[in-house]
Image (cartoon, rainbow, N blue to C red):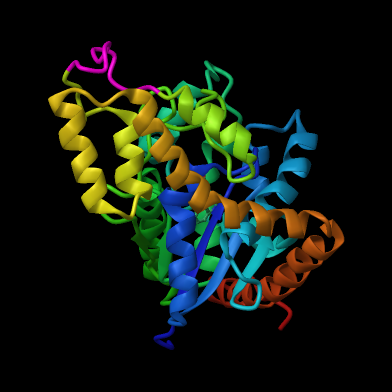
Amino acid sequence: MSDKKIILTGDRPTGKLHIGHYVGSLKNRVKLQNSGEFETFIMIADMQALTDNARDPEKIRHSLLQVALDYLAVGIDPAKSNILVQSQIPALTELTEFYLNLVTVSRLERNPTVKTEIKQKKFGQSVPAGFFTYPVSQAADITAFKATTVPVGEDQEPMLEQTREIVRSFNNIYGDILVEPEGYFPEEGQGRIPGLDGNAKMSKSLDNAIYLSDDADTIQKKVMSMYTDPTHIHVEDPGHIEGNTVFTYLDIFGEDTDKIADLKAQYQHGGLGDVKIKRYLNDVLQATLKPIRERRETFEKDPAGVYQILKDGSAQANVVANQTLTEVRNAIGVNYFD
Ligand code: TRP
């Protein structure tokens, strides 16, 4: 087997991407893509998005283009990365079907990510079977491209573990065909960004996100509304840094570490108002997001061009995934007429 490293990663198209996605995975992808050390596949996982949105396909259809625009905006470059659409790669479905036989229901029930999501989504007794088994379909996504490296947020680690188990089991039974992937996670303290309201998670459903497509005024309004330190009532009161969302964001997005250290010291001492630190954070975020938004606006004017990028990426992806599927079918022996 060749030792070239291969990246496969992706997102569910259920809405526009926000700065949580940016620090949690998009930034890493761009860095890895530009390192030139990988062949990169980035998937818009519309089939996976449908596992809990089957009754709202229009949302997925709309979000597909939004996610593609967000990718291009942050610097994912179709000349360097294949951007592909999951539903356009039929081999993935067939691989999923083979892998489903290698996984037990109880193992899927123990998958921590699925467990959490089932609670969050309030399915009760009505968990769609497709949703329950999506980790297996995700294993198909990863193995179809023989990915070695999967740059994702920390919450996806259980998916990778599940994939590795399927790979080991498959290779054990049918021979050495599939590749065990490893995760590639953001640096310590860099990957997770709380919501504007201080909630540990930034998400659309919690309405506490800054989107990559937000205009300058919207960003400013959101920053000025951010959660800080509820005990910091008067400017002269000493304030807390820990759990103070504004400082958490500054640690992630700010570059002038000396200035940030000074601001922290002043804030803790007392005499530095929330409005001042928010204004500074606003400047920092505007500087980060402006070039992203401008690139997005350029691509927004040409949706046909964006769809063409997805079509080309999917065509190339099909060549690779079909090759793996052929190997898998041959290994299992369902190639009767060859
Ligand atoms: N589960 C990922 C998410 O929630 C999306 C995804 C689908 C993915 N297939 C993948 C990520 C394969 C990494 C590899 O965003």
Residue at position x 43%, y 84% in the image: 4
Residue 147 in the image: above or below residue 28: below
Residue at position x 63%, y 37% in the image: 51
Residue at position x 38%, y 39% in the image: 193
Percent across and percent down for residue 105 are: 44, 37
Tell me where residue 109 sits by quadrant: top left
Point out the stretch of residues depicted in magenta. Answer: 227-237
Percent across and percent down for residue 108 are: 42, 39
The C terminus appears in which quarter of the rendering?
A: bottom right
In-image side of 207 versus 284 (left or right): right
Percent across and percent down for residue 49 are: 64, 41
The N terminus appears in which quarter of the rendering?
A: bottom left
Percent across and percent down for residue 281 are: 40, 39
Residue at position x 67%, y 47% in the image: 47
212 or 33: nearer the viewer = 212
Mark yes or no: residue 49 visible.
yes
Tell me where residue 73 sits by quadrant: bottom right
Q: Name the dominant secondary structure of the magenta segment.
A: loop
Q: Is residue 229 magenta?
A: yes
Residue 113 in the image: above or below residue 302: above
User: Number of callouts in the render?
Assistant: 0
Residue 202 in the image: above or below residue 257: above
Q: Which residue is most to the bottom?
A: 2
In-image side of 261 versus 83 (left or right): left
Mark yes or no: residue 178 visible.
no
Q: Is residue 164 magenta?
A: no
53 or 224: nearer the viewer = 224
Tell me where residue 308 sits by quadrant: bottom right
12 or 86: nearer the viewer = 12
In-image side of 157 versus 221 (left or right): left
